[in-house]
Amino acid sequence: MRVHHLNCMPFHLGVENVTHCLLVETDDGLVLVDTGLGLRDYTAPVPFVRAFMALNRVPRDPEKTAVRQVMRLGFAPEDVRQIVLTHLHVDHTGGLADFPWARVHVYAREYEAAMGPRGISVKDRFYVRAHWAHGPEWVVHSCAGGRWMGMDCVRVVEGEEVEVLLVPLPGHTRGHCGVAVGKGEEWLLHCGDAYIRDSQVGMGAGTRAFPGWARWVERWLFPEESVRRLRELRRVYGGKVRLFCSHDPEMFFRLGGR
Ligand SMILES: [Zn+2]
């Protein structure tokens, strides 16, 4: 299994954070899991993205985009044929426009949450429609009842050497999913924003993210239910599955990210 770990939006909130994306080599071209911010965000962002970047202290560096990193790895942008998204928040969809030919896999509940009328939740503000104004080819999956490691899943890419699955982990957003990449006994589970500190699922030093007084914000952004399921997954299947989330740098670097 050939998987590259890319940081497509570094940011500074007290400590150095990452936005962990995957580039997976398959028999049928490259699959990108989450996209971070895109070229337009780094060069001419829409007002919401500009404010988001300033608040999170994101350096203006287009070299951090997935498309530039794909090219530095020696691939052509067109080699990225498919994109799989954990959810459609701003820091996960910015790179879509840099691969307009790619098929974009998303879970149906997330697609509806992002495309439908805006709810009252602040979390709905983080859907930035400008990120998909170019009209990507969406592939919208409802849960077809597949099973993986005791959890529901939808198979979105089936290959000889590697499969890619959407694993619903709602809470952060209504249709938020993890993305499992692997085959047989060797899997990665990109948990997106199901949690924010590796220590929440029993890994890492846990010395970052929210200070004690802001733990309620953390629980609201990253509800406990999915976190509990992931802890259980790790307890039972930890020998086969390596977990990581989008923004904690610890697992990113441990998995060879750069
Ligand atoms: Zn995020």
Image (cartoon, rainbow, N blue to C red):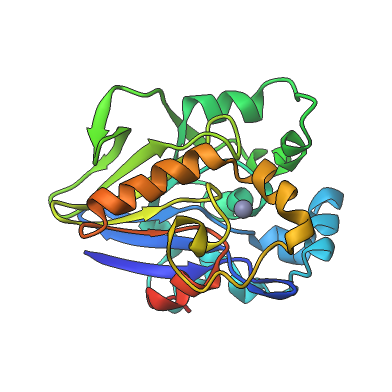
Residue 68 sits in quarter: bottom right
Of 251 and 2, nearer the camera is 251
Residue at image location 26% in from the left, 67% down from the top:
2
Give how far across and how far down residue 145 sits, in percent: 28, 23
Q: From the viewer's perspective, is 123 left or right of 107? A: right
Residue 43 sits in quarter: bottom right
Image height of 237 relative to 70, above or below: above
Q: Which quadrant would the N terminus be assigned to in this image? A: bottom left
Give how far across and how far down residue 222 sits, in percent: 61, 45
Residue 174 sits in quarter: top right
Of 86 and 74, nearer the camera is 86
The answer to whether residue 231 is visible is yes
Image height of 130 relative to 124, above or below: below
Work out which residue is located at the far front of the displayed protein and give it: 212
Of 240 and 227, nearer the camera is 227
Image height of 57 relative to 157, above or below: below
Q: How many marks?
A: 0
Residue at image location 74% in from the left, 48% down from the top:
217
The answer to whether residue 73 is visible is no
Q: From the viewer's perspective, is 44 left or right of 215? A: right
Q: From the viewer's perspective, is 134 left or right of 229? A: right
Give how far across and how far down residue 96 sits, in percent: 56, 49
Q: From the viewer's perspective, is 190 left or right of 128? A: left
Give how far across and how far down residue 195 sits, in percent: 54, 52
Residue at image location 18% in from the left, 47% down from the top:
159
Of 168 and 74, nearer the camera is 168
